[in-house]
Amino acid sequence: MMEDILLKKGLKQTKSRLLILDILDKADKPLTAEEIYRLIQNEEDSINLSTVYRTLEVFLNKNIVQIPLMKDGNKASYILNRDEHHHYLVCDKCHKMIKIDFCPFAEFEKQIEQLTSFTILKHKLELFGICPNCQGKTK
Amino acid sequence: MMEDILLKKGLKQTKSRLLILDILDKADKPLTAEEIYRLIQNEEDSINLSTVYRTLEVFLNKNIVQIPLMKDGNKASYILNRDEHHHYLVCDKCHKMIKIDFCPFAEFEKQIEQLTSFTILKHKLELFGICPNCQGKTK
DNA sequence: ATGCAAATGCAAATCATTTGCATCTAAAAA
DNA sequence: TTTTTAGATGCAAATGATTTGCATTTGCAT
């Protein structure tokens, strides 16, 4: 389960880390540091916002989380690193976000490696469009 | 040419705008506001950093520029919106950045539209890896 | 040439994120 | 189990990117 990951990565098991892992595990969308902080406050527990930032930084270095996109283009948002690979599609009007469970870039990456001699480690893809609800609306 | 774009978009022709357009036109990599500001200072001309930000915001709204990626994950960087479509590959070690001139996303886009009922307007793809020079180096 | 809306410079404000430092705590050592 | 200590946390202040208020200037339509 989720808690074991701290042991596996050689990290101390602290209240903050367990809370943040739990929040991320339950989330189905990327969350910003601020959002994680607020969600933890909602559960009567309380940890400091800098602790959230510091914890996320540790998790990032240990590959426990990743930042698939910048919310509103300016806030890092985090998801747990699961084995699945997916991307997000965001509505330009209402900002609704949905997960896209497949990705056509595996093939592409090989081509790029041959072309550039880089070793490709990862990619970030963000999709933007208009959701069904907002289509037809003026603005 | 480049200058006409202001007329076409119904924007006043000012020194700042022309300078910024010129810098972006000559650039072969995305530039941050700060970088544009510095490059303009180097050419003996001088405009204010807030003007750079305000100008880029106007250009963004008029689709004259786009932000293909966040430099170092935290600074918006801008390129001119040309008709070509491309992406960038960044070395995780030395941060060298190269342009990738093709993108297999067109077919994928249709599938996503059918799957989600969204209308896809654009996508951002960032590639990360290790460049030939840095391969084999320890850190 | 004139007038005005829009653009600019400058300084201060804002917002996300980071950091210094004193204190606390998980987990290794005794 | 108690002791020890490196690492984690809280709090407040600092930082860095970006935005904004306001007085002044400038492009361009009349």
Image (cartoon, coloured by chain):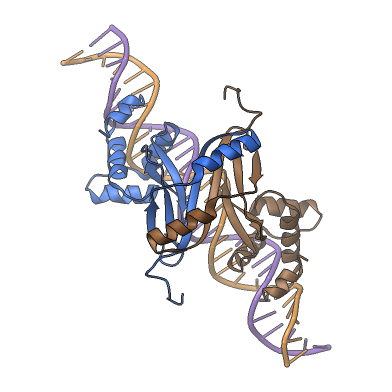
Chain colours: A blue, B brown, C purple, D orange
Q: Residue at x 75, y 71 (%)?
A: B4
Q: Quadrant of the C terminus of chain B?
A: top right
Between residues B124 and A31, which one lies in front from this camera angle? B124
Q: Quadrant of the N terminus of chain B?
A: bottom right
Q: Residue at x 79, y 58 (%)?
A: B45
- Residue A123 visible in the current orientation: no
x, y (%) of residue A52? 37, 42
Q: Residue at x 72, y 74 (%)?
A: B7
x, y (%) of residue A129? 47, 63
Q: Is residue B1 left or right of residue A92?
A: right
x, y (%) of residue D26? 76, 73
**Rendered position, B106 above or below A111:** below
Between residues C3 and B94, which one lies in front from this camera angle? B94
| Count of numbered circles on the image | 0
x, y (%) of residue D9? 33, 36
Quarter of the image where one finds residue A24? top left
Q: Is residue A108 left or right of residue A89?
A: right
**Rendered position, D20 above or below A53:** below
